[in-house]
């Protein structure tokens, strides 16, 4: 069970991103073929692609938090020692944690309003709750990844070891 949880922790966002990306590409390809070959398109295809993209974005944002892949200006980081760098990352994690909690609260309010009034999507005729949950789910995943990042950074600060800075996109 521990191996499964470890694999899930390492790859949950990747699997979800792959699933939504494949759903998006296949649906979009089918809709383009239907429109170009049969001169017919469906309203549900465009809607499904839109909502798959929204989930893709929010889950991708959580994955970026885990990998420290968000855009950042790190010029100052080159001049700091390991402990100061870890402390700066801890501060950044705490600020982002507070913002994510506020965003989670307000995004969940939108879901509750949708539940209260029973809104459904125009094409798929599915409860909008399923689609609106992308935002609170994304922020909940971000909070989980931020908690992990905070623990990792505090450990680096305590031990004086180099802080995890993510993979470099450019050198």
Image (tube, grey):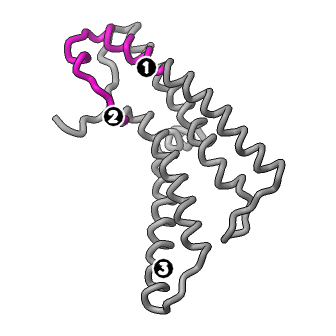
Q: Is residue 106 magenta?
A: no
Residue at which label 3 appears: 30
As measured in the structure, the alpha-carbon distance from the residue carrying label 1 to the one carrying label 3 is 43 Å
Measured from the top left, where is residue 49 in percent x and y? 52, 65
Point out the residue furthest to the right here.
Answer: 116
Point out which mark residue 73 bears: none
Residue 52 sits in quarter: bottom right
Horizontal side of 87 relative to 74 (left or right) equals right
Q: Residue at x 29, y 11 (%)?
A: 82
Q: Nearer the viewer, residue 153 or 3?
A: 153
- The residues colored magenta run 70-93
Residue at which label 2 appears: 71
Measured from the top left, where is residue 111 in percent x and y? 72, 45
Q: Earlier in the sequence, mark 2 or mark 1?
A: 2
As measured in the structure, the alpha-carbon distance from the residue carrying label 2 to the one carrying label 1 is 13 Å
Point out the residue furthest to the left here.
Answer: 171
Residue at which label 1 appears: 92
């Amino acid at each position: 069970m521990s191996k499964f949880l470890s694999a899930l922790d390492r790859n949950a966002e990747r699997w979800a991103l792959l699933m939504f990306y494949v759903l998006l590409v296949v649906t979009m390809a089918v809709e383009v073929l239907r429109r170009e070959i049969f001169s017919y398109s469906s309203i549900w295809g465009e809607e499904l692609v839109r909502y798959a993209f929204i989930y893709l974005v929010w889950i991708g944002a959580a994955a970026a938090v885990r990998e420290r892949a968000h855009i950042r200006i790190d010029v100052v980081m080159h001049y700091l020692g390991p402990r100061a760098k870890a402390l700066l990352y801890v501060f950044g994690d705490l600020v982002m944690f507070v913002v994510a909690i506020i965003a989670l609260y307000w995004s969940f309010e939108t879901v509750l309003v949708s539940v209260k009034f029973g809104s459904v999507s125009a094409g798929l005729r599915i409860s909008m709750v399923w689609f609106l949950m992308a935002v609170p789910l994304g922020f909940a995943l971000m909070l989980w990844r931020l908690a992990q990042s905070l623990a990792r950074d505090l450990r680096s600060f305590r031990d004086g070891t180099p802080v995890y800075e993510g993979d470099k996109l450019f050198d």
